Image (cartoon, grey):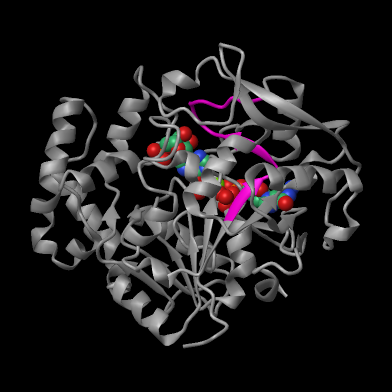
């Protein structure tokens, strides 16, 4: 076993879109295996290389490095049609994944009726602003023992019977005239779409256990983020998977001791897409400015992201939930040029006290007002690659931020491109990014 091997998890600490894709791409050259373990094509991970942007949804963000073997673990839900489009786009850009991709035979399929059910619900009063990709229904079918797994594609004769129970339930719910294709049409289309993938389907748990025993370095790419976690997020305004650390183990079948380090990813401010509590949200021109400068529009749906200051209580909760060893703070440059930068240090309750504890129930978030600490702004951090060259005001802000979540900064991102950022000396990332 290699002594220098580090198996590293990359996890989002806010409500998603923190810049996980950039960090995974940056670290990938030092890893032999890059693994997705939960979520589906609700994820949108952007990688920028020489000014060219590539959006990945289901393909792990190590795709641009030919030395990385890409694994889609059992905890993922997959839309194969979208996966094919993603592979085609990558191939057109010169990235071929043949021979370096394995899809778990236990991963679940996202089927057309899952998407129809997701969209139908989003048209009603209980709308939570999902990505409309069928993620919730696909995970519900999994938990309800009506899911269809990639491995079922290897037994085409059983497919109609596997799909039927879930399909019938959705049809009952949506009623006649819902526009759903027939079961036969869904099976036929699936078999056609699946054909090019059959040779990629296999035992990802066995593959990863062998890779681990061999001493390969494994990078685990989280999708979504802790505040969107089905258990530890702002329920019910969450996604349907465990995006925090527990999901890594159930979503790969690896034991906890296979993991060495946890890198938490957070923006220097906060965003969220869709409905749900967000006390830090700025409803004014400052919020608009963060959206414009940070290009805060969804990678997957193009929706404008809600923007606000860095929220220490939610990020500290995420750090504790995941046992984060170090922070990657992203998009500091987006705060450049502001007179003042805010940091949410707590929430003022209706009774006038200040708390840093996150409510468990959506109803208890109502009435909480963000308590802002203000810092002097700075001119520019864009493209800085040595943290000692940061303006003193930016350094003071970052120090306060790290202190507020009790985790040190290991990486600071100062622009979307690979080379725009600083690695902090003495941290566990230094040997990986040297
Ligand atoms: P992910 O879902 O966590 O991978 O993040 P997204 O890709 O959805 O959103 C992050 C966006 O910010 C992408 O468009 C990145 O190219 C961009 N980005 C990442 N780091 C930086 C940075 O330091 N500065 C700026 N300005 N943009 C960044
Ligand atoms: P990445 O990996 C930001 C949000 C949706 C919605 C909620 C539920 O790019 O960080 P779903 O379609 O999952 O049932 O939607 O979760 N959401 C994300 N927000 N980034 C993501 O992924 C997201 N994936 C889901 O906007 O509020
Ligand atoms: Mg994203």
Res. 131 visible in picture:
no
Q: Residue at x 48, y 55 (%)?
A: 222
**Is any part of residue 40 visible from this angle?**
yes
Give the x, y percent position of residue 185: 18, 47
Between 216 and 320, the residue placed more toward the observer is 320
Say which quadrant the C terminus sits in: bottom right
- The picture places residue 182, in percent across and down from the top left corner, at 16, 41
User: Please, is residue 55 above or below residue 297 in the view?
Assistant: below
The residue under the point 46% across, 68% down is 259
Q: Is residue 303 above or below residue 143?
A: above
Instruction: Reply above or below: 258 against 333.
Output: below
Question: Whole-percent x and y of residue 356?
Answer: 58, 31
Q: Nearer the viewer, residue 406 or 210?
A: 406
Question: Was residue 266 drawn as part of the magenta stretch in this picture?
Answer: yes
Residue at 40% across / 51% down in the picture?
A: 40
Percent x, y of residue 301 = 51, 39
Side (left or right) of 39 relative to 421:
left
Position of 249 relative to 367 (above/below): below
Q: Is residue 384 magenta?
A: no
Q: Nearer the viewer, residue 288 or 251?
A: 251
Left or right of 264, for residue 329: right
From which residue to which does the magenta span run? Answer: 264-281
- Locate residue 134: give its quadrant: top left
Taking 395 as reference, is 41 left or right?
Answer: left
């Amino acid at each position: 076993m290699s002594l220098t091997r580090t198996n590293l998890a990359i996890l989002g600490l806010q409500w998603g879109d923190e810049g996980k894709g950039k960090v995974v791409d940056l670290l990938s050259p030092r890893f032999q295996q890059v693994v997705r373990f939960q979520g589906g094509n609700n994820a949108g991970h952007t990688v920028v290389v020489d000014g060219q942007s590539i959006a990945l949804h289901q393909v792990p963000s190590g795709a641009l490095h030919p030395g990385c073997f890409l694994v889609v673990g059992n905890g993922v839900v997959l839309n194969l049609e979208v996966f094919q489009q993603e592979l085609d786009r990558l191939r057109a850009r010169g990235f071929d994944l043949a021979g370096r991709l394995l899809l778990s035979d236990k991963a679940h399929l996202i089927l057309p009726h899952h998407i129809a059910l997701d969209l139908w619900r989003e048209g009603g009063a209980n709308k939570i602003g999902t990505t409309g990709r069928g993620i919730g229904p696909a995970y519900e079918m999994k938990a309800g023992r009506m899911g269809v797994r990639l491995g079922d594609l290897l037994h085409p004769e059983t497919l109609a019977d596997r799909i039927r129970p879930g399909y019938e339930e959705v049809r009952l719910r949506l009623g006649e005239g819902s526009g759903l294709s027939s079961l036969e049409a869904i099976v036929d289309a699936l078999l056609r779409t699946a054909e090019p993938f059959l040779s990629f389907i296999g035992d990802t748990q066995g593959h990863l256990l062998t890779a681990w025993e061999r001493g390969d370095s494994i990078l685990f790419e989280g999708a979504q983020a802790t505040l969107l976690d089905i258990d530890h997020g702002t329920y019910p305004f969450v996604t349907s998977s465990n995006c925090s650390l527990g999901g890594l183990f159930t979503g790969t079948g690896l034991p906890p001791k296979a993991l060495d380090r946890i890198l938490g990813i957070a923006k220097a401010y906060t965003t969220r897409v869709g409905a749900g509590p967000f006390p830090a949200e700025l409803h004014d021109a400052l919020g608009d400015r963060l959206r414009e400068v940070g290009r805060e529009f969804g990678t997957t749906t193009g929706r404008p992201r809600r923007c606000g200051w860095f929220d220490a209580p939610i990020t500290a909760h995420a750090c504790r939930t995941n046992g984060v060893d170090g922070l990657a703070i992203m998009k500091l440059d987006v705060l450049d040029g502001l007179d003042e930068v805010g940091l949410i240090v707590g929430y003022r309750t209706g009774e006038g006290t200040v708390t840093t504890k996150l409510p468990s129930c959506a109803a208890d978030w109502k009435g909480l007002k963000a308590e802002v600490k203000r810092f002097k702004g700075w001119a520019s951090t864009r493209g800085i690659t040595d943290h000692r060259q940061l303006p003193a005001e930016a350094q003071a802000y970052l120090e306060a931020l790290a202190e507020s979540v009790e985790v040190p900064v290991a990486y600071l991102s100062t622009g979307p491109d690979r080379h725009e950022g600083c690695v902090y000396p003495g941290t566990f990332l230094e040997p990986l990014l040297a």
